[in-house]
Image (cartoon, helix red, strand yellow):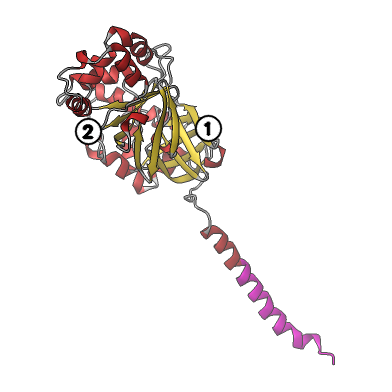
Amino acid sequence: MSYPISALLPLWRRLSFLLIALLGFAASSCDDDDDTMPADTQQNIVQVAQSNPDFSILVAAVTKADLAATLSGTGPFTVLAPTNAAFAQLGAPFNSAASINAIPAGDPQIATLRNILLYHVLAGRVAAADFPSGASAQLTQKPASASGVNDNTVYVSKTGTTVRLNGSTSVVTADVAASNGIIHAIDRVLMPPTGKISDIVVASAAASPAQFTLLLQALQRPAAAALLTAAANPSSNLTVFAPTDAAFQALLTQLNLTSLSQVPDATLVAVLQLHIVGSRAFSSDLASGPVTTLGGPVTVGVNGSSVTVRGNGNGTNNANVTTANILASNGVIHVIDRVLLP
């Protein structure tokens, strides 16, 4: 049976409308699967940040630090952009737009803020997929504080699509496009390292309350001079599991001793070596199993965000990592609550 063309036109129109609707739905579904934040790629990085209310503190900081013109320039740049919630974790005056705006001209805190912000900027356009899997080091636009001092590098750990920075900071929204680069929103402000491992131990021993007094005493023993030299070497790249004073005191009590000076040199050096790994490993880089230290293997346990470590001489008694990922220019420190024993 045949039909006149005039009778088929209404059916053809209905099918055309249905096809258009289906194509529109498919396009919408594809957009829903995209994890990136939409942005107008005709806007530069500063303009994209200004258009997002969750970057209002970042915009205030960039303006106060006189970086708006730089980040509006040709680039391209990759900006690791702390959200407002990330800035709110800091102390005053960097924890709100109002406090940042109130910093007077010429205040040294502006230079500090500028260095912190430049520590969040990479040269070039680096999409999340372009970060290599595993651990990598990314040079930032922050100037090094001195020749040979590595305090301007961000450390990236990528597992699948999960990207972490300096061990504790996560990319929460990746690949926000801009005309002069790309933005990755992060959940913590990245702080450049304040010194070498030795500097951090000395500062913590002098702080109130003190934390590493006994660790410093141990490292200052002449027999441990090589370990202290490594901790002070700007070219080192170490991980230190650092026992607190309470951890050392508990061990002395267990051994019926009153002072570290009563521990023989060879024993003390062997114990210290067990706390030092010859490469930088953030908590996000650790996995359950053996880890080789300068003094032999220790056993690491990872359960979610909790990390434990024990030496062969600790039996079943684990040391807990109580503070992870203290960044040094020559490594990273994890604070532990028990001394590791060979």
Q: Nearer the viewer, residue 287 or 160?
A: 287
Q: Residues within 10 Å of mark 2 (few under 14, many from 20)?
A: some
| SS for callout 2 | loop
Of 98 and 326, the residue lying toward us: 326
- Label ID, residue 313: none
Position of 251 compared to 152: left or right?
left
Q: Percent from the top left, x then y, of residue 198?
A: 31, 16
Q: Percent from the top left, x then y, of residue 208? A: 14, 24
Residue 106 in sight: no
- Viewer-closest of 294 and 144: 294
Q: Is residue 210 visible?
A: yes
Q: Amino acid at mark 2?
A: Pro
Answer with left or right where residue 198 lies relative to residue 160.
left
Q: Which residues are magenta?
A: 1-23
Residues 194 and 245: in front is 245
What is the crowding at mark 1: few (fewer than 14 residues within 10 Å), some, or many (at least 20)? many
Q: Residue at x 42, y 17 (%)?
A: 236
**Residue at figure coordinates x 29%, y 17% from the top left:** 199
Q: Residue at x 53, y 58 (%)?
A: 33
**Residue 261 picture quarter:** top left
Q: Is residue 16 magenta?
A: yes
Proximity of marks 1 and 2: CB atoms separated by less than 8 Å:
no
Question: Quadrant where the C terminus lies?
Answer: top left
Up/down of 137 relative to 149, above or below: below
- Give residue 12's position: percent from left, percent from top: 72, 80
Question: Which amino acid is tagged 1?
Answer: Pro
Return the disc, 1 or 2, that comes first in the chain's sequence. Answer: 1
| Pointer 1 residue | 76
Dot 2 corresponds to which residue? 93
Inter-mark Cα distance, 1 to 2? 30 Å
